[in-house]
Amino acid sequence: MDIYDEILTFWFPDDEYHKWWVISNKKLDQKIFNNYYKLLIDTYENFNIDNYKEDNFKKILIDIIILDQFSRNINRILNNINIFEFTKKALLLSYIWIDRKYYLIYNFKYSAFAFLPIRHQFNYTLLLDLLKLLNDIEQDNKHNKIFIKFKFHTQKSLLKLL
């Protein structure tokens, strides 16, 4: 199993919504720090958008999770990571996810994390565009618990900016 498969299995053990994705958890943060800190730094320091020209949804998704999510988990341990700089790079990968329409191909649980860097920008225009995209795909996802929660929190984030 390569590192991308390992992280995919770790972060998505099934098709269910997991509270530990969004709620601070010291044990999880420590595990991510122990297992993936070096990978986080390597991914950040060696980031080059040209490395994502190939059609590899797994690499894009996992690098988004590493840069946007794992940086937050690890920062709760170290408290010295500028998570917004990591998220800026993840955001570029989110745009690739959208351009390639992976949100139409793969389970929404993946898109929720691919879209999070957009939500983490706290930018009204970006959130509005994301909400429009979510409205466009809602019919196919209206029974998906992860989709419902993600859309709700996206709307909530947008309202906070008004």
Image (cartoon, rainbow, N blue to C red):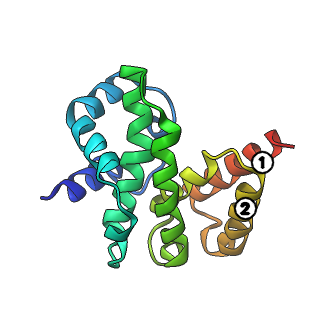
- Count of numbered circles in the view: 2
The residue located at (87%, 43%) in the rendering is 162
Residue 135 drawn above or below residue 91:
below
Provide the secondary structure element on which disc 2 rests: helix
Relative side of 114 to 161, left or right = left
- Taking the image as shown, residue 5 lies to the left or right of residue 50, namely left
* Residue 104: assigned label: none
Secondary structure under tag 1 reads helix
**Position of residue 129 in the picture relative to residue 13 (left or right):** right
The residue depicted at 12 percent of the width and 58 percent of the height is 1
- Indicate the position of residue 142 as horizontal and vertical percent values: 65, 66
State the residue lying farthest toward the right.
162
Counting from the top left corner in percent of width and height, residue 65 is at 40, 50
Q: Answer few, some or many: residues within 10 Å of disc 2's Cα (few below 14, many 20 plus, some between 14 and 19).
A: some
Pointers 1 and 2 in contact (CB under 8 A)? yes
Looking at the picture, does residue 7 appear above or below residue 107?
above
Residue in front for this viewpoint, 35 or 37: 37
Extreme residue toward the left, this view? 1
Residue 119: where, in percent of width, then height? 63, 49
Residue 77 placement: quadrant:
top left
**Mark 1 and mark 2: Cα distance apart in space:** 9 Å
Q: Residue at x 50, y 31 (%)?
A: 23
The structure residue drawn at horizontal position 44% and vertical position 72%, both measured from the top left corner, is 106
Q: Earlier in the sequence, mark 1 or mark 2?
A: 2
* x and y, in percent, of residue 136 in the image: 70, 74
Q: Which residue is mark 1?
A: 158
Q: Which mark is residue 131?
A: 2
Density class for disc 1 (Cα within 10 Å; few <14, some 14-19, many ≥20) is: many
Kind of residue indicated by mark 1: Leu
Q: Is residue 76 above or below residue 96?
A: above
- The amino acid on which the numbered mark 2 sits, given as a three-letter code, is Leu
